[in-house]
Amino acid sequence: MGTLGAALSALLAVDVTATASRYRRNVFLWAIIAILLGTAYVFALAAVALFLAARYSPVAAATTIAVVLFVTALILIGVMAGLRARDRRIAEARKRRAALQANLALVAAGSIVRKQPLLAAATAIAVGALLGVGRGRRRSEER
């Protein structure tokens, strides 16, 4: 049994090391991607500002860019608020459904216990299993 434990722990150490290395690599690559995209965004804004400054005054070009970015930010805030409200409604519906299932299970358990007292232990186990399954779903839905 000692050899099996050593083999399993070595296998686990290899997986953890590989996973940590993969995460480090991905973080580094995403940081480079974010820097490049940020730089491209700044140069795109500068190009738009120069283009508008050639047609209009530099103050009008800067004001136009600021207004467009502000309106875009307001639109994104509205979209985020709508998504948050939708997520809240979905979570409340899931809570209501879980409460309804628990209540139905308890009612069914009560009727079975009254009709056949010998099945009380099996019913208690079934109710515990139902409640346990409901809790496992909630944890996975929060992710």
Image (cartoon, rainbow, N blue to C red):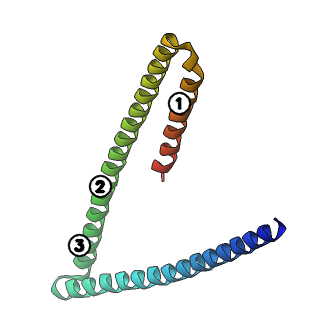
Where residue 21 appears, x then y in whole percent?
A: 62, 80
**Pointer 2 residue:** 79
Q: Along the polypeptide, which appears first: circle 2 or circle 1? A: 2
Compared to residue 11, the image places residue 120 above or below, namely above
Compared to residue 132, the image places residue 7 above or below, namely below
**Pointer 3 residue:** 64
Answer few, some or many: residues within 10 Å of disc 1's Cα (few below 14, many 20 plus, some between 14 and 19).
Answer: some
Where residue 141 appears, x then y in whole percent?
A: 45, 48
Q: Which amino acid does the dot numbered 1 rest on?
A: Ala
- Mark linked to residue 126: 1
Q: Which amino acid does the dot numbered 2 rest on?
A: Val
For marks 2 and 1, give the one nearer the viewer.
1
Q: Which of 21 and 13 is in front in this view?
A: 13
Q: Do the residues labelled 3 and 2 touch (CB within 8 Å)?
A: no
Kindly report the distance in space between the C-alpha atoms of the residues bearing marks 3 and 2: 23 Å
Compared to residue 109, the image places residue 134 above or below, namely below
Q: Quadrant of residue 5?
A: bottom right
Where residue 132 appears, x then y in whole percent?
A: 55, 37
Quarter the N terminus occupies: bottom right
Q: Which amino acid does the dot numbered 3 rest on?
A: Thr
